[in-house]
Image (spheres, helix red, strand yellow):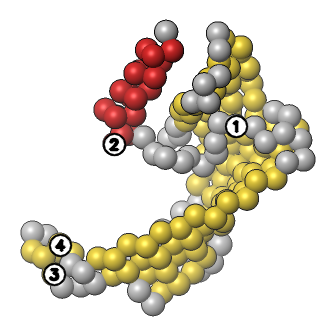
């Protein structure tokens, strides 16, 4: 039975990778009361040419991004998350759109060698600075977003897990 779960998980990840993202706004795990997690992520993109319509144009653009993530356990089944991104595109640099989310455990069901959790997350993100929002060096769109999302998390005894979440 466990091999079927592995095969199913692998197949879903392989064949629907264009629909999935590696990290959502919240994760499927609960931190526990008083526990704090902090992480730093980032990346670099270097582009030497772009398309303008069907023509390649010699415009270069370098993008550097960094993000400070955090999560804190308010109670056993209630967490708060935050994100603080920084973006630099060519010589334009700024803090971008910060976010804060609350996640509440609604249901926890023990299954054979796994646990299934159903949670609900609610969050808000907005620009934290008056950054450039137009042109080739636009940092972002200064969007103000109110987000509601279900979070379904299956944690298997074999240390594999699957988390599904989505928002509109």
The span from disc 4 to disc 1 (Cα, nearest Å) is 41 Å
Work out whether mark 3 precedes mark 1 in sequence or the reverse, and give the earlier one: 1
Q: State which quadrant residue 18 falls in.
A: top left
Say which of 136 and 84 sits in front.
84
Q: Residue at x 64, y 64 (%)?
A: 40
- Could one spot residue 151 in this view of the protein? yes
Residues at circles 4 and 3 in contact by the CB criterion of under 8 Å? yes
Mark nearest the camera among 4 and 1 is 1
- Other-residue count near label 4 (Cα within 10 Å), few / some / many at <14 / 14–19 / ≥20: few
Badge 4 or badge 1: first in the primary sequence: 1
Residue labelled with disc 4 = 51
Q: CA distance from mark 2 to mark 1?
A: 24 Å
Q: Earlier in the sequence, mark 4 or mark 3?
A: 4
Q: For mark 2, what is the residue?
A: 18
The spot of residue 129 in percent (x, y) is 63, 78
Task: Choose top left, top right, bottom left or bottom right for residue 126.
Answer: bottom right
Is residue 152 among the parts visible in the rendering?
no
- Few, some or many residues within 10 Å of mark 3 (<14, 14–19, 20+): few
Identify the residue shown where x is 90% and y is 47%: 34
Q: Earlier in the sequence, mark 2 or mark 4?
A: 2
* Residue nearest the observer in this picture, 113 or 138: 113
> Reading the chain from its start, which is encountered first: label 2 or label 1?
2
Tag of residue 57:
3
| Left or right, residue 120 beside residue 36 | left
Marks 3, 2: nearer the viewer: 2
> Disc 1 designates what residue?
29
């Amino acid at each position: 039975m466990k091999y079927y779960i592995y095969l199913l998980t692998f197949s879903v990840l392989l064949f629907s990778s264009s629909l999935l993202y590696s990290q959502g706004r919240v994760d499927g795990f609960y931190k526990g009361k008083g526990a704090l997690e902090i992480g730093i992520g980032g990346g670099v993109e270097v582009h030497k040419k772009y398309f303008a319509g069907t023509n390649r144009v010699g415009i270069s653009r370098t993008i550097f991004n960094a993000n400070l993530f955090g999560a804190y356990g308010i109670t056993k089944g209630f967490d708060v998350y935050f994100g603080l991104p920084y973006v630099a595109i060519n010589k334009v640099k700024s803090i971008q759109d910060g976010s804060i989310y609350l996640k509440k455990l609604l249901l926890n069901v023990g299954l054979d060698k796994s646990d299934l959790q159903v949670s609900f997350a609610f969050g808000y993100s907005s620009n934290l600075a008056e950054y450039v929002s137009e042109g080739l060096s636009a940092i972002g769109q200064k969007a103000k977003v109110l987000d509601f999302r279900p979070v379904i998390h299956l944690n298997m005894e074999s240390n594999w897990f699957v988390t599904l979440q989505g928002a509109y």
